[in-house]
Amino acid sequence: MPTVIEHALRDAALLLADHQSPSPRIDASVLLCHVLDKPSSYLYTWSDKVLSEQESKDFDGLIERRKLGEPVAYIIGYRDFWSLRLSVEPSTLIPRPDTERLVELALARLPTGEGNVLDLGTGTGAIALSMASERRDIQVTGVDLRPEAVALAQRNQRENHITNAQFVQSSWFDKIPAQTFTMIVSNPPYIDPEDPHLAQGDVRFEPKTALIADEHGLADIRHICQQSPQYLSRDGWLLIEHGFDQGDAVRALFTEAGFYDVETQQDYAGHDRVTLGRSTR
């Protein structure tokens, strides 16, 4: 039986709600826009348009995948972040709005004029490319341990026509030549391996190596804090994203590593999310 857009969205949202989707209506709308290759406004302007048999079949297939818990970004193959559209794959984390707060804080502290920024654990390249797109006068280097992540970041660089960034395969600083950076930024793994949330929601489908860290999620943050001073110019900034309940512990790690002007900033929901400090080197 022919289905109009309004009814297709309603039925899909009800189905997803029954399967614990946190945002069933939004999920259904994004997936139908993807099938129709139309903006969201089209769904409401043409809510009485009848879907073709193929469109209905394709939409039902995507809804079934979402019903099983697969993240919308993996289903459609991209996620909008900052001012960019980034391709995503199951080999990398899905960029989240909370990380835009890190970009915002970093840009606000980046000195005017030429500079260079290091993004550790770049994944899709979200942080590196966002900063490079806003500041064409700087050079940004993103590193990731996984070659598939480096390839994806390079693809996102090409697709967004950004020329002042490069991506390197490296375990943190291991393959970074001796040099200093104006700023180092990172959204490293920071979830405790025993955290029950790892078995819930979208993170079930994301790579665990990009999510978890030993020492209750602090091992990689500790390593970055300890190694960063030798790669930062004097008074250079280090900014690290972390869990909402890790602010105290991360500030202590910054202080132990010799950083000053250490503080923790909140995300858009008011939770501790980014700790930053300046190098005394």
Image (tube, rainbow, N blue to C red):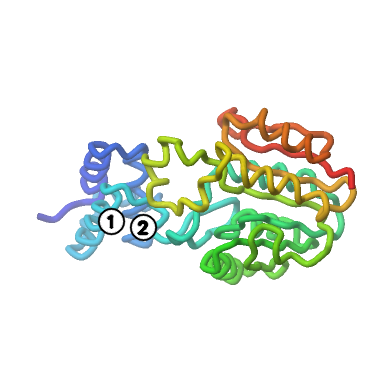
Q: Residue at x 76, y 63 (%)?
A: 139
Residue placed most toward the observer, 253 or 266: 253
Q: Is residue 192 above or below residue 45?
A: above
> In the image, what residue type sits under mark 2?
Ile
Residue placed most toward the observer, 269 or 93: 93
From the image, which quarter does the N terminus lie in?
Answer: bottom left
Relative horizontal placement of residue 263, taking residue 2 as reference (left or right): right
Q: Which residue is mark 2?
A: 75
Instruction: Tell me residue 219's x, y (percent).
Output: 62, 43
Give the secondary structure at mark 2.
helix
Residue placed most toward the observer, 228 or 82: 228
Q: Residues within 10 Å of mark 2 (few under 14, many from 20)?
A: some
Relative horizontal placement of residue 182, taking residue 203 as reference (left or right): right
Q: How many marks?
A: 2
- The image quarter containing residue 145 is bottom right
Give the secondary structure at mark 1.
helix
> In the image, what residue type sits under mark 1?
Leu
Q: Earlier in the sequence, mark 1 or mark 2?
A: 1
Spatial CA distance of label 1 from label 2 is: 7 Å
Q: Which residue is mark 1?
A: 62
- Determine whether label 1 and label 2 are within 8 Å by CB: yes
Relative horizontal placement of residue 243, taking residue 260 as reference (left or right): left
Q: Residue at x 84, y 48 (%)?
A: 236
In the image, farthest residue toward the front:
215
Instruction: Tell me residue 110's x, y (percent).
Output: 80, 49
Residue 144's disc number: none
Q: Residues within 10 Å of mark 1 (few under 14, many from 20)?
A: some
Instruction: Tell me residue 218's x, y (percent).
Output: 61, 40
Instruction: Tell me residue 43's x, y (percent).
Output: 33, 50
- The image quarter containing residue 213 is top right
